[in-house]
Image: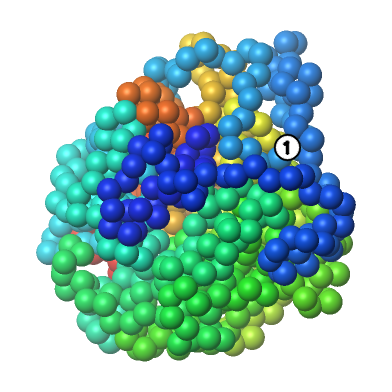
Amino acid sequence: MRHHLVTRAATGGVLALLLAGLAAPSLADEPAENVTKPVPPLTAHESDIPDPDIRAWWNLTYDRKPEPPVPGKDYGMDAATGRFVHPKATPLVRSAPNFPGQLDHWDQQSYKKNVEVLGFTNFIPSTGHTWQSIADFGGKRYMYTYYRAGVGVFDITDPRKAKLVYRRGQRIGAYGKPDIVNPYGKGEGFGAANISWHRGLGKYVMVQAFEVPRYGIMDEKYREPQGVETLKHWKGLKGFRVYAMDGPLPDQWRLIAERTSDYRHPDAPLGAQQGSGVLDIPAWNGGKYMFLSAAPDDRFMLTEFADYIYTPGYQVWDMSDPANPTFVSQFAAPGQILGDPEHEAAYLMNPRAGNRTSWFGSRMPPFMTKAPDEGGRIAFGAMAGLGLYSLDISDPANIRIVGHVNQVPKFAGTEFDNVDLSQYERTGYIFTNGYPMNDECYEPYKDILVVDARNPADLKIAAKFPRPSPPADAAFTDFCQRRGSFGPKRSGYLTQPGRFRDGVVAYAFYNGGVQIFDVKDPTKPTIAGYFVPRFPTEAETGGQSQGNLTYGIFAEYDRNILWAFTNHGFYALSSPLIGKPSFKAPAKPWPPRD
């Protein structure tokens, strides 16, 4: 997850203070220790990088960081077609340049097709990203929308009138200033959460993931040893916590277990735990096995990403007793482990090696339609610059690679981040995509790829989703002209009610809003509907992540409601493409209790 523009550096300090239980400063008051200090340029075959792991990684390759392309020359608008031509490669940047032909303002118009707006809620835990979970208690439906230092719990039984029933931590107020209520204590926060029904306990159980920051600590790990030291010795938990939910509100939850993903040092205290911690929402359905995205220790460091030091693989934990999670196995794809000759050789064979830009490794757990304890055998792992893997997970203690496919490198931004399995059991095809991290279309376009997975041992890229175009009444002919970030993010999460809908899939598309695709024939996807919201005013965000418009979507397929999460609040949407919406509690509670 990543904020855009000025917040890439600033939010790390704000987050650290919030987790320490202090009031957040304004951006102008950013603590001195988080200000990037000038450093001398690196020389070829650098040997004096202080951290031995970063030095060893650096010396494996020669520096192939892309030169910044020139707007209007190397990329920009094609006058003949009115379409934007993306740059071939770019570095990851804090603030991207504008290009000739962009709007000189933040577009205040909204656009829609086959979509109706049911309601809007002005609540912003973060302008860069939020996670969502839904759980039903006592005939009411509750939605949790949160990010690290802030959380809001809403009664959405009637989705047209979301009611805030609990709030804690950071919320963005007027002019982008954090509005603090009950800040979390030191080392605390709200981690990416999975809520599942546990039959043995007879109640919902929440697993929250905790990780090191993915941005804001430094800009370039090979120039800033203090940032590397901060991540290696992060003072918060690197792992996960398990809560028994006696009600819908956090005050009604009981902590029943805590584990570090540093399985080789299970008793290591905070600050001494190695690795990344657990990224994104754990993959668990309340059964025996839970899958996580995690780099377990400081060997998992073969990644080009400039301001992050880890390359996460996959972990499996036995959750038969949620109060006593037991480590089962760790998976690493070829090319992840520093100091291992075979991994280093695989890493060097990747055409991205040396570009000082690409993310290597997972950002989410493996994707599967059935857990192994339900008879599931195949999962799919999106591992960014390492490609897409099909995995045999039938024996979770010994995950085995079945197939693999990659694409031509497209950096900056991340590659192979998400996998959508909504049509897999029906058709044998899956959808996968990376997403943009630079604003102003300052990177190659991130396609949604259609992968033929009918034979998991022989994955093939079969088609691409169409690139969204603005409606005819827009004041621009290409979404890149609208400013900000443009490209696909995700199509929701495994925790969303009803999971999937045959023949239809919706994606968050940043400045392209919500795009709904007809995928009855997955090899010939078409755009069937969209909702493109207005941009916020600067008074609403203070310029923080101004271009990071629609970064999330969460679907209630059991009630035919789409929730779109933006940098100025969230929208409840309906569409005839997915069915008539329901404005009452569902007949069967979510998560499933059978």
Q: Up-down: is 354 above or below 390?
A: above
The percent position of residue 370, horizontal first and vertical second, equals 50, 73
Residue 285 visible within the image = no
Q: Identify the residue at the far left of this view.
A: 138
Q: Amino acid at mark 1?
A: Thr
Corner quadrant of residue 541:
top left
Q: Looking at the image, which residue is at 22% across and 81% down?
A: 202
Which residue occupies the foreground of this view, 373 or 50?
50
The percent position of residue 557, horizontal first and vertical second, equals 36, 51
Residue 38 visible within the image = yes
Q: Looking at the image, which residue is at 53% across and 52% down?
A: 217
Report which residue position mark 1 lands on: 90
Q: Up-down: is 42 above or below 322?
A: above
With 397 as the anchor, is 333 left or right in this view?
right
Q: Looking at the image, which residue is at 57% across and 44% down?
A: 36
Which residue occupies the foreground of this view, 593 or 261?
261
The percent position of residue 143, horizontal first and vertical second, equals 26, 53
With 127 as the anchor, is 138 left or right in this view?
left
Q: Up-down: is 32 above or below 429?
A: above
With 318 as the anchor, is 323 left or right in this view?
left
Q: Looking at the image, which residue is at 78% across and 67% down?
A: 56
